[in-house]
Amino acid sequence: MELNELLGLEIDLRIPNHYNELSSDEMSCRILEIKRRLGARLFIPGHHYQKDEVIDFADIRGDSLKLAQICAEIPEVEHIVFCGVHFMAETADMLTKEDVQVILPDMRAGCSMADMANIEQTEKGWERMQKIWGDTIIPLTYVNSTAAIKGFVGKYGGACVTSGNVHTMLKWAFEQKERILFLPDQHLGRNTAYKLGIALEHMCIYNPVDNEFKFDGAWEDIRVILWKGHCSVHEKFTPEHIKHVKLRDPEIQVIVHPECIFNVVQDSDYTGSTNYIIRTIEEAPAGSKWAIGTEMNLVNRIIAEHPNKQIESLNPFMCPCLTMNRIDLPHLLWSLEEIEAGRVVNRIKVDPDIAKYAVLSLERMLELS
Ligand code: 13P
Ligand code: SF4
């Protein structure tokens, strides 16, 4: 019995073996041919963290905000083969028409941060928070979350955020309610709230595992409830890395993604979304020196695109995001050939009952972005 059958899943987890025996050139040629044959019926969005062999075939590259905006506006298309991770494909499915088929080339391309918040935990925690603070809380979720969490947030009047609009969204949320529940990335929530002037003692951490809160001070002073989740990639940058590069060369400027821990963001020269990082380096003068704290596929690409600038990863032992890296040439080719054969594999289809509310949270975000 196949693994997916054993798990009771209606998805193809395993790519046929012969794909792994093909050369890169052979796969690239076949992908280009399929793209040519399918023309405007096919759209391939690619997140900046995708590996080069895959991003080369993307019709558009972007961060999660840009890719969500594009999917919301895309005209006639039959198939979206999403080169990114699961929550991004879910978002694309919810923002496109019913008959558009959104496909994730490898179902194992998840996001460990999104997996840190499930709906049962969220409902249980929310019940507790309502008992403590009453109807004073608005939920916000980073788009790096499941459709079910987006649905929860939409149902209770909240919205999604991405790293590209998080300041705007937090300001908006504080105009709606006194307190914010921020899921699932504690670091993005803390870093942004702090920049907006909320003191650390006015934030608490909610641990979904034991349904407990961690903070010093008084319950009534809490303005931001931070879900205890994190990105396992961005947590690998430390203040010691910054000390080390600055000691080696004081002219090096440090730029990091706001999923990094608080002290890293505090000690760096610049912090911002994926798009902000790309733009800042593009606009920097020739000869400038940079250490970047974000995902490694992207850092390597930035280095290659700017030979006239001295750029390195803030952490010399950094790896790419493993789940983003699940999407590779064999999986891309397999999903495209299956489309042509009329057998759609790995379709991402969000339950309409969940999508109904999740779309609300996405639309609130898109309206304000
Ligand atoms: P952005 O694309 O919003 O910068 O997010 C980074 C990320 O971690 C995507 O998974
Ligand atoms: Fe998730 Fe972090 Fe990978 Fe982004 S980089 S997909 S947040 S694990």
Image (spheres, rainbow, N blue to C red):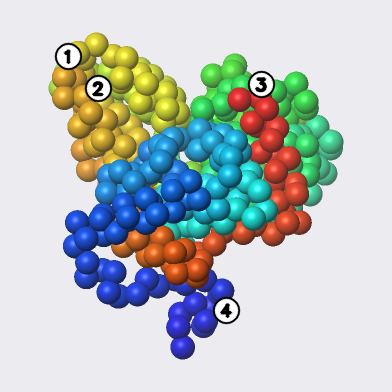
From mark 1 to mark 4, how far is it between C-alphas?
A: 56 Å
Residue farthest along the front direction in this orientation: 37
Which amino acid does the dot numbered 1 rest on? Gly
Q: Nearer the viewer, mark 2 or mark 4?
A: 4
As drawn, the residue found furthest toward the top would be 285
In the image, is residue 145 above or below residue 364? below
Q: Which residue is more in the foreground, 118 or 38?
A: 38
Decide which of 228, 157 is in the foreground and name it: 157
- How much space separates mark 1 and mark 3, taking CA atoms? 37 Å
Q: Secondary structure at mark 3?
A: helix
Q: CA distance from mark 2 to mark 1?
A: 10 Å
Q: Amino acid at mark 2?
A: Trp
Q: Which mark is residue 8?
A: 4
Q: Residue at x 19, y 56 (%)?
A: 25
Say few, some or many: other residues with alpha carbon within 10 Å of mark 3 (under 14 / 14 to 19 / 20 or more).
Answer: few
Q: Which residue is at 42% across, 38% downward?
A: 60
**Residue closer to the observer: 11 or 45:** 45
Name the spot of residue 261 as percent of width and height, x first.
43, 34
First reached walking from the N terminus: tag 2 or tag 4: 4
Three-letter residue code for mark 4: Gly
Q: Which mark is on residue 12?
A: none
In this image, 8 relative to 56: left or right? right
